[in-house]
Image: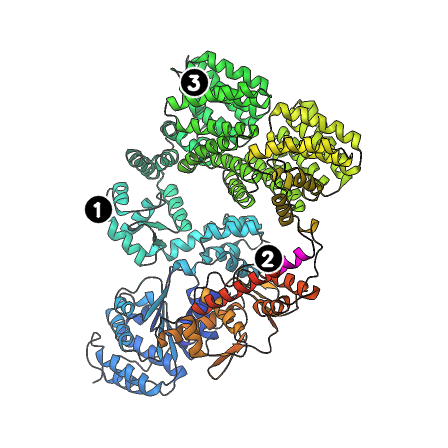
Amino acid sequence: MGNQAMDNDYPLITRKIQIPDRSGTLLRRERLVGFLHRNTNHRLVLITAGAGYGKTSLLIDYAHDADLPVCWYSLDGSDGHVFTFIEYLVASLRRRFPAFGDSVLRALREFTGPPEDIEPFIRLLLDEMQRSIHDYFVLILDDYQEVLESEPVNALVDGLLRYLPENGHIIIASRAIPRRLTLTRLAAREDIVGLGVSQLKFTRSEIEQILQLRGLTDLSPEQLDALSQRSEGWITAILLAAQTQWSDTIQRIVALSGSLDTVFEYLAREVLAQQPESVQHFMLASSILEQMSPPLCDGLLQTTDSARTLRMLSEQGLFTYEISNAAGWYQYHQLFREFLRAKLEAEHPAEYRELWLRHARMMANQGNWARAIDGYISGAAFVDAAGAIEIVAQDYFDTGRSATLLGWIERLPNSVVMRHPRLLLIGAQIHTEAGAYERAEALLEPAYCVYRERSSNIGTARVLVQRAIVQRLQERYREAIVSFDEVLRTVSFRQDPSSVVKAHHNLGICYQILGDTDRGRQEMRTALDLAQSQGDIQSAAYVAHDLGNSYYLEGSIDEARRYMHQALFHWRKVGNPSDLALTLQGLGVLHHHLGEYTEAQNRFEESLEKARSVENRRLEAYALLNSGDLERDRGRYQQALRFYAEAMQTASAVRQSGLMLYILASQGETYRLQHRTTMARQTLAEALDHSVRQGLEEPIGLCHLAFGALSLQEGALGQAAEHLQAALELLMRSGSQRDLGRVHIQRALLGHLRNDRGSVLAELFRAGEIAFHLGTEQFIVAEGAHALPLLPYMSESRIAGLDPTSIRAQIEELFPSVVMLPHPRRERPNVQLELLGLDRARILYQGQDVHDFDSAVARTLAFLMAEHPGGLHKERIVDLLWPDTSQARAESLFHSTLYRLRKALDKQVVVAQGSIYQLNPNLTYRYDVADFEQLAHKGLQEGYSAHYARMNAIDLYQSDYLEACDHPWCNDLRNTLQHLMIQLLIKEAEYLAEADQVL
């Protein structure tokens, strides 16, 4: 009598072996579908992730998209019985290959052995595949976690994978890794590829698209960013939120608030409730940890088997992931952790607090104060938290972690903070750095009272220092001087070296700003000597920065560089973003005024990034102002004005009125250079009026300088003379050598307009002395066309420090329109595809830059096709792109690369005739190398048309050909084009020399 392996009285459930229909709200995830397409040559594709990551949806999309036959099998709990599994497996394959499986079904009906004896069925299935299936095919086994514990089913699948014919491929989707399959053997043979949580997470763009498919179209970019980060790409959480909050506000959906009950119910039902009680307790108790390791969990839970539990949770895909860059460390998905933590706090509040306190003490004993503080606060041990914060406060502040520090302080009850004056003081320092001066002063007052009550001179002095710094930053310089003097009366250097150093340092800054340079520098040198005597490198770095500024204003560039680099070295080592931003700006100004514009731009950009990273609006405003000045001196006036506008808005927000005057003066100077006379005069008048009212000599001098230059342009020579004389007197007192040089240049132009040769030469000699002292002529070059009338005087009189040829060359580079007439430009053709090998290897399709090629070689393949418009044989392409790879492997690479190229651009961008591949002749495209070579051929001839061709060819050459490509064919072409470019430049130089267009 046969075994009842099959029971013909019960029909099969056909939905288990039918490819499900695509839903109208199913998002096509092109990057993942493409992955499956590219990798079906592997024997096994394994997709593993917890519930709700879109595994089944991805497989449905792929199954409908694939050109080859796809056989579908959705597993459930009943399929752990191996005979049921075989029956459905045969039925799945028969849907696409009707002749398949008769021998297997016959054997199944007649089988009398135990379920473990599956070897005959492996052989029969493989034999049927060889005989009945002649096409490439894919077998999809979805929800494989249902049979993970079935030894016979896994042995059967393992046997099939071992001997699967080359035209067969299997895709397994599972919530957990199928450990009973010998995956290592497949990996050793490169027969397996996989997708995990990191790939299956929905990207920000995919989240946006899937919500749009469901009618949610009003989310802003910021809301989408928040939703992506909050969900960590777990799409089920988002869809549950959207489903339950469909008529609610977008903000609640973005925050996943108000909808977490549904998400948590899902987690409780689908994940937590399915686990044994001991595992549930482990998950709940460990949820207070952001990251978990076996020793940490053992200590917290007072157990010894955490390693086994964590490994099991990870392997079963229970929203527990091993951290890729930290062996032995795990973490829960953040929403799952929140669910567990909320459940623990609600149902076991005493245990919740005890776990936090135990964790805090463990972390404190290890010196991990950040974790300890969080634990104390979460466990409501606020006094312990305050004490721990005081231990790390200064270090956190000095290393730019102010936001974290302030967050801890603000989580403490006010009654606790008010009895900890060190926390009040550090909070005031943080608010001062952010430009919130009123909030800083509000914290300093109670701190001062507590220290006075405790008779602490040191504490009192430190509060006074901070109060005086706030006064200085509010430009109340004389009040600040009084406060710093009080600090020096309150404590001695022996009692409190830090406060005394800060007092001398800030006194130096105040005196410098008020025009007493000698007294200011004396105070700063005192501060530097005292700091170095104590080994206080950080304070020494602050002072060194300001001394660098002082010496720069004097024109002592080498001294300025030395002090600035000393400060920069320390800030990079310590990693304090605010101080690093400040010194980067100082060095950026040095580079700018030396004409080293690229270096200056790099410094300013990094400074701006650092300032914004710590939300220091004052430093941000300075970085924007300096960037504007740089763009102005490069002749990029519109960009400069944009920087100034943003700088003004930022400075206004933090009430930096003095800085706003400098911004106004810079704006007025830019309008002057643009010949926008009315705007220049209005802006400069406003700046001058406010500067006079505040009594700040340097911005007053700068306004008079700009007014003088503006009057020269208008031909009002008398007014110009008055303004320039006032500027000379004021800027001599401030000691800014560069600005004095600018005054002398404008006075030389005044002499030129008055035909007073002696006056011109006298002013140029003074400008030359300053240029020689500064080591740069940049302040002359920045005038652009306005400086050109002075060049003949320099040439004839050979003025020391001024090289007219160099000045003209720099002006030509920055302001080419002032020296030579513009030449006609070729209009850009209207084509579908542009391949710009001479412009950073850019590829434009339908007018848009294309970046997503998935690999550099796909981009290179496009240029190779363009270089051979008549087409190339596949073997030749392989030889050129993969010369060191086997032919079989290289052909596989070619097909995947071609797929990527077509995916990035268009399916028909490359067409084949037999083994010959070429860019589609029906596609209109432009290849800039072909244009360049055609223009260069004409440009090497004579006459104006050749000049026109040369200039257009030179315009095309924006970068060396495919700079990142190191293939021999590419190197040869690059060298040829470089040589051709040099020939064109030489030819054009000869043409201009003959036309008398260069000095």
Q: Position of residue 824 (x, y in %)?
A: 70, 61
Q: Position of residue 354 (x, y in %)?
A: 32, 36
Residue 770: tell me if it is visible: yes
Quadrant that contains the N terminus: bottom left
- In the picture of the structure, the residue carrying the numbered disc 3 is 459
Residue 28: tell me if it is visible: no
Disc number placed over residue 217 in the picture, else none: 2
Q: Position of residue 713 (x, y in %)?
A: 76, 38
Q: Which residues are magenta?
A: 988-999
Count neighbours of disc 2 (C-alpha within 10 A) and say few if under 14, some if 14 to 19, many if 20 or more: few
**Foreground of the two, 47 or 859:** 859
Residue 979's place in the image compared with 582, above or below, is below
In reply to whether residue 995 is colored magenta, the answer given is yes
- In the picture of the structure, the residue carrying the numbered disc 1 is 304
Residue name at image x 44 percent, y 18 percent: 500
Three-letter amino acid code of the residue under disc 1: Thr
Count neighbours of disc 1 (C-alpha within 10 A) and say few if under 14, some if 14 to 19, many if 20 or more: few
In reply to whether residue 777 is colored magenta, the answer given is no
Residue 758's place in the image compared with 960, above or below, is above
Helix, strand or loop at disc 3? Answer: helix
Looking at the rendered image, the disc whose residue lies closer to the viewer, 1 or 3, is 3
Residue 449's place in the image compared with 258, above or below, is above
Three-letter amino acid code of the residue under disc 3: Gly
Counting the numbered discs, the total is 3
For marks 3 and 2 on the same chain, the one whose residue lies earlier in the sequence: 2
Give the distance between the C-alpha atoms of the residues marked 3 and 2, in whole angstroms.
Answer: 56 Å
For marks 1 and 3 on the same chain, the one whose residue lies earlier in the sequence: 1
